[in-house]
């Protein structure tokens, strides 16, 4: 039996154009200087401890979860984050800000979609603020937030929750391989 979210997204996928949550950077990152000490560079796998704040509130952190590991240049991270950690060394700490342009992009008005309620399973009772998730036809995971419930339709926002937000990071490089 499908969950309510899965049933809702099965209906939504037929009428919603899926938006990309991770914009591609058009600039090229500067190459760090070689000094014999390992530095964060494209192709390196690094581990970092981080705290992400938006509007002064912590929205994500590695504290209590262990360091975040990723391969630099593999597009696993937002462009502004990768650019900011380039050239850092193990043990180095840094605080930086990532603009929406280099983060999750601006809010896209086309990502606000109206869906007829008749396409929803009768057991789905959408409410404002409800978060829904599912998979796109290509297998990517997508999420949406219900922003309005009307008699015959619902309105969902497919923008990434951090789209349009300025991101403030505190990071420390833990390892470089």
Image (cartoon, grey):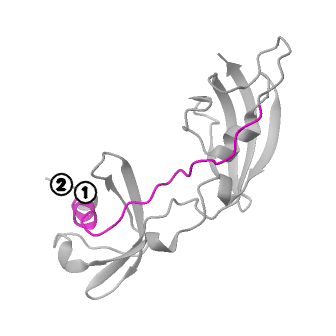
Residue that lies at the very extreme toward the left in this rendered image: 1
Residue 13, magenta (yes or no): yes
User: Quarter-wise, where is residue 45 in the image?
Assistant: top right
For label 2, count other residues whose C-alpha is less than 10 Å away and answer few (under 14), some (14-19) or many (20+): few
Label 2, label 1: how many angstroms apart (C-alpha)? 6 Å
Q: Which residue is mark 1?
A: 6
| Residue found 38% across the figure and 60% down from its top | 18
Residue 177, magenta (yes or no): no
Which x, y percent locates residue 118?
Answer: 18, 79
Residue that lies at the very extreme toward the right in this rendered image: 35
User: Quarter-wise, where is residue 171 in the image?
Assistant: top right
Residue 2 badge: 2
Q: Is residue 167 above or below residue 78?
A: below
C-beta proximity under 8 Å, tags 2 and 1: yes
| Residue found 30% across the figure and 47% down from its top | 138
**Magenta residues: mostly which secondary structure?**
loop
Secondary structure under the numbered disc 2 in the rendered image? loop
Q: How many marks?
A: 2
Which x, y percent locates residue 143?
Answer: 40, 58
User: What range of the chain is rendered magenta?
Assistant: 6-30
């Amino acid at each position: 039996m499908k969950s309510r979210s899965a049933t809702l997204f099965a209906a939504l996928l037929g009428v919603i154009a899926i938006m990309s949550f991770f914009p591609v950077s058009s600039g090229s990152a500067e190459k760090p200087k070689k000094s014999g000490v390992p530095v964060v560079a494209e192709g390196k796998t690094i581990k970092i401890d981080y705290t992400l704040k938006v509007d002064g509130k912590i929205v994500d952190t590695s504290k209590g979860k262990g360091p975040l590991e990723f391969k630099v240049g593999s597009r696993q991270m937002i462009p502004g984050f990768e650019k900011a950690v380039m050239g850092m060394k193990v043990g180095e700490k840094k605080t930086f800000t990532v603009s929406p342009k280099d983060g999750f992009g601006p809010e896209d008005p086309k990502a606000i979609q109206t869906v007829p309620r008749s396409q929803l399973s009768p057991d789905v009772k959408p409410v404002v603020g409800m978060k829904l998730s599912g998979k796109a036809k290509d297998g990517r995971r997508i999420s949406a937030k219900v922003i309005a419930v009307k008699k015959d339709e619902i309105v969902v926002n497919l923008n990434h929750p951090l789209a349009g937000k300025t991101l403030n990071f505190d990071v420390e490089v833990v390892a470089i391989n």
